[in-house]
Structure formats: C-alpha cells, structure tokens
Image: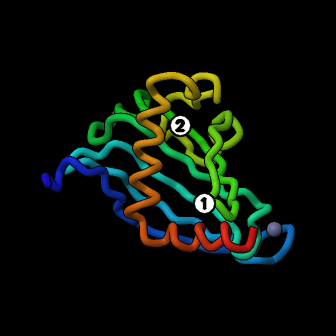
Amino acid sequence: MNESATIVANHWDSSSSPCECCGQYSQQIWGDLSLGDTRLAAYFVHWTEGRPDHLPNLDLIIGPWGNANDSANRILVTLLFKPSANGGSFMVTDASSRAGLYGDLFGRAMLRAEVVGTPLASEVFALVDALWLTEPRIAEVKVLNRIS
Ligand SMILES: [Zn+2]
C-alpha cells in the first residue's frame, strides 16, 4: 500500500485546564492532517475528562497552507462529538460560534447548511476518519463513550 495515499494526523501540542463549570480537566490537542507532504487541514479537539455531557468540540481549518496569504482561502468547519456506547457520532455545527478562537487562521466560518449534504461533507468526514484513526490521544475522547 502506498503510504502517501493515507491521511495522517501529526500531533503538535496539547494543553489542559480545569473546566469552569465542574472543575474536571478540559483537554485540548491540536495538529495537522496531511496526505504525504501536503497539509490538508489543522485540527483542534477539546473535551472534558469524565464529562460525556460536555460534548467534545472538533474544529477543522481546511485549505491551503504554505503561503502568507493562504489563510483567506481556508475555511473553519466545526463539529460536536456526541459520545455513546455504540461509538458516538458527529454533528456538523455552525462554525460562527467557534470562529473567535482562531483569529485570522481562516477566511470563512462555514454554517452547518454549507457543509451537510455538499461535496465538502465527504472531505470533512475523510479528515475526521483519519483523525480518529491516527491521533493517539483520541483514545481519551473514546473513553467518554464508555461512561456516557
Ligand atoms: Zn464542566
């Protein structure tokens, strides 16, 4: 199998802080999703330990990387992960609610209706699949499925 044909998550960094509402630790990880040498997206995953009811956020900034003015051509797509005993599910949400977190890294925050049912949706879910399979710390998010 050609290794470069598989999208792979490259972990960059992580942070944690107590959740303001419950004091449990909220975790954040971020990195990029790349196909061979081509970066397709940056990912940011945020969840709270022991709290499947704090639906984890999965934010993707999708588009070209490498030139200074590429950010205007990138889009922000946001999803919520709903943990459950059968493995959980993703819901695309309006990215406007998360846009303030990412400054000028992207040009446009996508509404749910601009993603669901469009060709972009299959691209998004290919990225999500790759993240779920190749980012080791997603195992900590999957723990929420068992306690939901
Ligand atoms: Zn909390």
Residue toward you, 46 or 142? 142
Residue 144 seen: yes
Per the image, the residue denoted by label 1 is 87
Picture quadrant where residue 20 is located: bottom right
Q: Where 26 sits versus 80, above or below?
A: below
Extreme residue toward the right, this view = 21
Q: Residue at x 64, y 60 (%)?
A: 86
Question: Ligand 1 shows up in which quadrant of the image?
Answer: bottom right
- Judged from the image, the secondary structure of the residue bearing numbered disc 2 is strand
Amino acid at circle 2: Leu
Q: Are marks 1 and 2 in contact (CB under 8 Å)?
A: no
Which comes sooner in the sequence, label 1 or label 2?
Answer: 2
Camera-side mark, 1 or 2? 1
Q: CA distance from mark 1 to mark 2?
A: 25 Å
Q: Quadrant of the C terminus?
A: bottom right
Instruction: Give the label on residue 76, or none.
Output: 2
Q: Residues within 10 Å of mark 2 (few under 14, many from 20)?
A: many
Q: Residue at x 36, y 51 (%)?
A: 33
- Judged from the image, the secondary structure of the residue bearing numbered disc 1 is loop
Q: Where 51 sits versus 30, above or below?
A: below
Picture quadrant where residue 77 is located: top right
Amino acid at circle 1: Gly
Give the percent coordinates (x, y) of residue 123. Answer: 41, 35
Give the percent coordinates (x, y) of residue 61. Answer: 47, 42
Give the percent coordinates (x, y) of residue 39. Answer: 29, 46
Q: Is residue 121 left or right of residue 4?
A: right
Q: Residues within 10 Å of mark 1 (few under 14, many from 20)?
A: few
Q: Residue at x 25, y 47 (%)?
A: 35
Q: Residue at x 52, y 72 (%)?
A: 139
